């Protein structure tokens, strides 16, 4: 499944991300790209000086770093298997998959004991 240059436009990306594990095949991959926070700043500055469309910059709801993306994906039982920044650090590519049953049970047990 692909989500290319979408996440930064969503007010609540969890509304979409929570559906991914349900729709993804057990061995499937979920691939997303989104600007980094640095890329968001560059885009906003570029829009102010007419290098980029101002309307496009106005449509951005938020920018996420690797840790924030990992936390969001983990919340919906997905784990990052590959992470790359591209375009001089302005964008990021994230490949994820469903967490294994063993990881999920260990994670659940850990939560029980740490509570």
Image (spheres, rainbow, N blue to C red):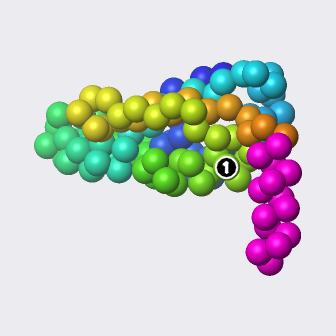
Q: Is disc 1 surrounded by few (<14), some (14 to 19) or many (20+) residues within 10 Å?
A: some
Whether residue 41 is visible here, answered yes or no, is yes
Residue 72 position, x and y percent, is: 62, 51
Q: Residue at x 44, y 44 (%)?
A: 59
Q: Is residue 104 on the magenta stretch?
A: yes
The residue segment tinted magenta is 102-115
The dominant secondary structure in magenta is helix
Read off the residue under disc 1: 74
In which quadrant is the C terminus drawn? bottom right
Identify the residue at image location x=83%, y=59%: 108
Q: Is residue 63 left or right of residue 100?
A: left
Q: Is residue 19 visible?
A: no
> Where 64 sits versus 99, above or below?
below
Measured along the vertical axis of the image, is residue 67 above or below residue 114?
A: above
Judge by depth and name the residue closer to the eye, 21 or 7: 21
State the image coordinates of residue 30 (x, y, percent, origin top left): 64, 28
Residue 84: name its quadrant. Answer: top left
């Amino acid at each position: 499944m692909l989500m290319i240059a979408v996440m930064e436009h969503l007010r609540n990306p969890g509304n979409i991300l929570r559906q991914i594990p349900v729709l993804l095949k057990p061995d499937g991959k979920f691939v997303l790209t989104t600007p980094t926070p640095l890329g968001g700043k560059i885009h906003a500055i570029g829009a102010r000086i007419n290098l980029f469309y101002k309307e496009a910059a106005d449509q951005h709801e938020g920018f996420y770093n690797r840790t924030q993306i990992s936390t969001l994906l983990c919340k919906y039982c997905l784990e990052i298997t590959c992470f790359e920044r591209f375009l001089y650090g302005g964008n990021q590519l994230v490949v994820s998959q469903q967490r294994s049953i063993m990881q999920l049970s260990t994670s659940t047990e850990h939560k029980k004991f740490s509570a």
